Amino acid sequence: MRTTLFTDSVLHGRSESFEVFVHPSPHSTAIIINYPGYNGHIDGYNNKYRTLGAHLSKLGVGAFIQMPNTIWDRGMDYGHTLIDDLLSTCNYAKKIAGHVCKTLEPNLYLMGFSAGAGGVAGAAYHSGAKKILLMAPSADAALQDVTKSLSHYSGEVYVVIGKNDDVVGPDAGKRFYNMATAASKRMLVELPECDHQFRGTKNGKILSKAPIWAFVGDRTFPSPEDGLELY
C-alpha cells in the first residue's frame, strides 16, 4: 500500500510531502517504521527494505512502514527535517493502525540505518515508540537532538554495529548505547567481519534477523541461520 504522506511537523513548522509504503499485518499488535540512511531510497539497495517488510509483516512481527530519507531544499536544516519526517510518519502510523494491524493502539517500533538510525534516536523520546533498533548509527546531522532524546528515552534500545565499519566506526555503537541512560533495556551487538553496509550474504542474513531480535526477542541472533538473503 503506497501513499503520499504530508508532514505534520511536531517540532518545526513545515509543509512537504513524501511517499511511504505500508505492509499490513492483520494479526499483529505492532507497527514498525523503517528509516534508511542518508538520502536513502524507500526500498533500499536491491529492494532489501521491501523484502524485509514483506517478511516481517507475514511473520506477524508487525505491520511495516517504509519511508525514504529525504534531503530537502538547502535552506532547511537536515538535522531538523530528518527527525520531523520520522515523527510525521509516527503520527501517520497511529492514524492508520486500525487498517493495518489488529489493534487501534499498537506498539510502535522504530528501526533505522546510519543517518536514519540517528533520526530514530533523535525522535525516540517524542515518538511514543516502545522499542528502537539502531543499525550502524550516525548522529552527525542531529547530535544535540540525539543526545537529548536518548538521555530521556525510557523504552528499549538495541544497537548493531560492524566491527569493520569504515564510515562511523565500530565505536559508534558504544556511543549510542552509552547515551541511552534512561532506557528500560539496552543491548549492543558488534558483528565481526562486517562493514558499514553489512555487505555479503552472511551479513545480509544477520541484518534481516535484527528486527526480530529487537522486537520479539529472537535468541538466535546474530546467527545468520534462517535469515533472508538481502543481497
Image (tube, rainbow, N blue to C red):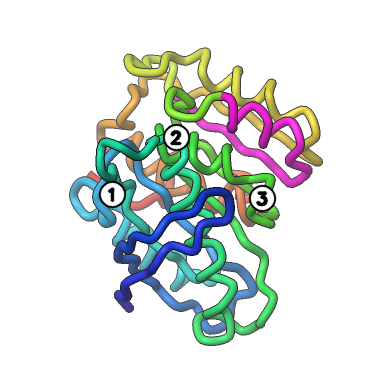
Which residue is denoted by mark 3 in the rendering?
A: 126
Which of the marked residues, 1 or 2, is nearer the chain's N terminus? 2
> Where is residue 63 drawn, in percent x and y?
50, 71
> Where is residue 29 drawn, in percent x and y?
64, 74
142 up-or-down from 94: above or below: above
Secondary structure at numbered mark 3 = helix
Figure quadrant of the N terminus: bottom left
Label 2: few (<14), some (14–19) or many (≥20) C-alpha neighbours in 10 Å: many
For the residue marked with disc 1, what is the amino acid?
A: Glu
Residue at image position (33%, 69%) is: 21
Residue at image position (43%, 55%) is: 14
For the residue marked with disc 3, what is the amino acid?
A: His
Secondary structure at numbered mark 1 = loop
Which residue is denoted by mark 2 in the rendering?
A: 79
For the residue marked with disc 2, what is the amino acid?
A: Gly
Residue at image position (42%, 44%) is: 81
Per the model, the C-alpha gap separating discs 1 and 3 is 34 Å
Which of the marked residues, 1 or 3, is nearer the chain's N terminus? 3
